[in-house]
Image (cartoon, helix red, strand yellow):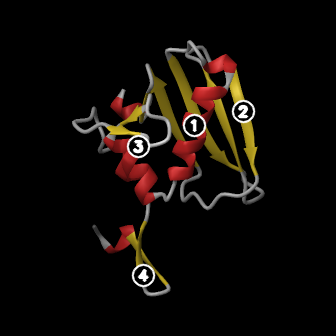
Amino acid sequence: MTDQQTQSLNGNQRKTLREQDLSNFYGTEVWYRHPAFRTYLYTEGVQYVAEHGEAYWLLDKIFACQASVPKLSGEDFCSWELKKNVEGQGARLICTDGNYNELYSESILYTDFPLASIKFYCVNNVLLLPTEY
């Protein structure tokens, strides 16, 4: 890990997420199972985002929606995007189908997610980065 990938926070080292790091993920060799939503798996790239972006909360939110929002049941492919608000500290989480039809959206009042936006695909109960598709 380079100095650019870590920050000192009150003397503790904190990993950081950089957009250029995400392009290194193609396919996956390791699958992770979500502890609360055991039906769902996610890839090494998604694990990297959760760990380095301190965004396990985002995985929880996506899997909770996948499991409980009626419009999402039966969808074999969903695209999830988190876009931070330009004017504030919040963000918008949007889920669409493969044809860009909005299936779910939610405003998030506050996030310290380090990137301006992030996109995931959920394909047959597996969450992955677009480069891993």
- The answer to whether the residues at label 3 and label 2 have Cβ atoms under 8 Å apart is no
Q: Residue at x 74, y 38 (%)?
A: 106
Mark 2 / mark 4, whichever is N-terminal: 4
Give the left or right position of residue 118, taking residue 123 as reference: right
Q: Residue at x 42, y 59 (%)?
A: 52
- Residue 99, placed above or below residue 94: above
Check disc 4 and report its element: helix, strand or loop. strand
Between 92 and 43, the residue placed more toward the observer is 43
Check disc 3 and report its element: helix, strand or loop. helix
Q: Residues within 10 Å of mark 4 (few under 14, many from 20)?
A: few
At label 2, the amino acid type is Ser
At label 4, the amino acid type is Asn
- Residue at mark 4: 12
Mark 1 / mark 2, whichever is N-terminal: 1
| Residue depth check, mark 1 versus mark 3: number of the one nearer the observer | 1
- State the mark number for residue 4: none
- Residue at mark 3: 46
- State the mark number for residue 62: 1
Mark 4 / mark 1, whichever is N-terminal: 4
Answer with the quarter of the image where residue 129 lies: top left
User: What is the C-alpha distance between the residues marked 1 and 2?
Assistant: 11 Å
User: What is the C-alpha distance between the residues marked 2 and 4?
Assistant: 35 Å
Instruction: Locate residue 86, reporting x and y percent.
Output: 72, 54
Instruction: Locate residue 44, reporting x and y percent.
Output: 32, 43
User: What is the C-alpha distance between the residues marked 4 and 1?
Assistant: 29 Å
At label 3, the amino acid type is Val
Pick the quarter of the image with the N terminus. bottom left
- Residue at mark 2: 105
At label 1, the amino acid type is Ile
